[in-house]
Amino acid sequence: MYKNFKISLLLLLSGKGNRFQSDIPKQFHLLLGKKIYLHTLDIFYEEDIFDEIILVTSSKWIDQVKKDTSHYKNIKVIQGGKERQISAYHALKATSKTDYVMFHDAVRPFVTKKIILDNLEAALKYRAVNTCIKSTDTLVQIDKNNKIYKIPDRSTFMRGQTPQTFEYKLILNAHEKALKNGIFAATDDCSLVLDQTLIHVVEGSETNIKITSPSDFILAERILKSRKQSIELENKTASPNTHLKSKIYAVVGASGGIGKEIIKLLKKENAKTIEISRTSKYKVDLEDFSSIEKVFNKIYKKFGKIDGLINAAGLFLVKPFKKLSKEEIEKLINVNLLGLIYSCKEAKIKGNGHIINISSSSYKDGRKDYGIYSAAKAAVVNFTQSLAKENSTLKINVVAPERTNTQMRKKFFPNEEKNLLLDPKKVAINIINILKEDLTGNVLEIKNEA
């Protein structure tokens, strides 16, 4: 029924983010490779129910936001004020003959479709709506001496979130009345209409968090990984489609283990493959920068820019650190880290192409007798995350499989039970599916669910 009315989304992203302890406002930080406010915007945009979207930001960030959202339709980017109330008022004045407005914090990227639709349906009936959740903690009231003097019944208290949705004329009049009365710093739009109408409450969500501190950011990463970006796929291939057809992918370490399985699956997807290893047509010595430079120049001359690079090469050696020779240490670092870094540097990849680097579950925990390997794999993760933040034109991710049933591993652990190890094919399936996704900046852990 709300489709019979004009509805505007007012997304507030002009906060300074002082509590986030960063020179960059929190809404512009990358959350798994994508700016926080863009995560939020996309949830509303994909619903396709808003006639216009007003993005309110500080003057310093207007040009950047316009650039970020240049491919969206029906979006206005306007300058906010020093206080949230003023930013909200500017957004109200920027709307175009709307019937209802929905305010939302740009740093709440986990609002759900249900919350959005519940807001709209309730607003048509009640004129003013707030999104709230129950308080599970005991509430206390304290005096000026920091002493508790009252413990109220928590069943009558709720925690307010956004969105908050209003009949346009109602909230506009409330804002204008507040300004006329000298009120300029209200932190909640509902507080401005309390004397004019009852406010209906719709149920929010515990995960509809507002990212205001570094600890919130860590929680947000976990929520996003579990909700949207978990690539724990079934251990079987989907029917090949045309998504990767005729695209060109270079696989470093293509002659064995995971790399070999990746090549097989790419061919099933009708993609073109460039196999790079010590023994393939495109030979490379990952310990030698000039060799890496040479092979990628050769590839560029023949194919031009390619669609993606997958770094699957690795060197595994189990030996106590004190017994490792200088040559062995250098070889472990060169093959597992430097060779990968140089491959990322020298590969010429098309815009919107992929880089997928393969790490290991040992990146989180230095393993006994192969600490150099673990350290290199941890460095691969950090390098990949950094590279993704530096390069917005590519989709750059790192895959961290658990112990995998490869010849390289079996050489050192011949008695491991096979059912406790990942099948290299499962790792390859995950990587093929990542190539079909619009993900960047992720650490995608692949586990053996058997």
Image (tube, helix red, strand yellow):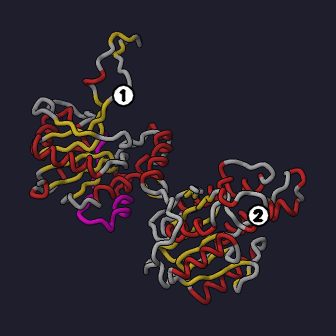
**SS at mark 1?**
loop
- Quarter of the image that includes the C terminus: bottom right
Position of residue 284 in the picture relative to residue 185 (left or right): right
Dot in front, 2 or 1: 2
Please tell me whether residue 274 is drawn above or below residue 174 in the rendered image: below
Give the label on residue 410, or none. Answer: 2
In the figure, is residue 306 to the left or right of 68? right
> x and y percent of residue 250 in the render?
61, 78
- Give coordinates of residue 437: x percent, y percent: 45, 67
Q: Let me know if residue 101 appears in the view.
A: yes
Of 262 and 376, the residue lying toward us: 262
Name the residue rendered at 62%, 82% in the picture: 274
In the picture, the quarter occupied by the N terminus is bottom left
Q: Residues within 10 Å of mark 2 (few under 14, many from 20)?
A: few
First in residue order: circle 2 vs circle 1: 1
Vertical placement of 317 versus 20: above or below? below
For residue 305, above or below residue 333:
below
Res 210 → quadrant = top left
Three-letter amino acid code at disc 2? Lys
Identify which residue is drawn at 24% across, 34% down: 184
Q: Is residue 149 magenta?
A: no
Marks 2/1: CA–CA distance? 51 Å
Pointers 2 and 1 in contact (C-beta within 8 Å)? no
Which residues make up the magenta segment?
63-85
Q: Residue at x 34, y 16 (%)?
A: 141
Q: How many marks?
A: 2
SS type, badge 2: helix
Q: Amino acid at mark 1?
A: Thr
Residue 123 percent across, percent down from the top left:
14, 44
Q: Which residue is mark 1?
A: 136
Q: Quadrant of residue 34?
A: bottom left
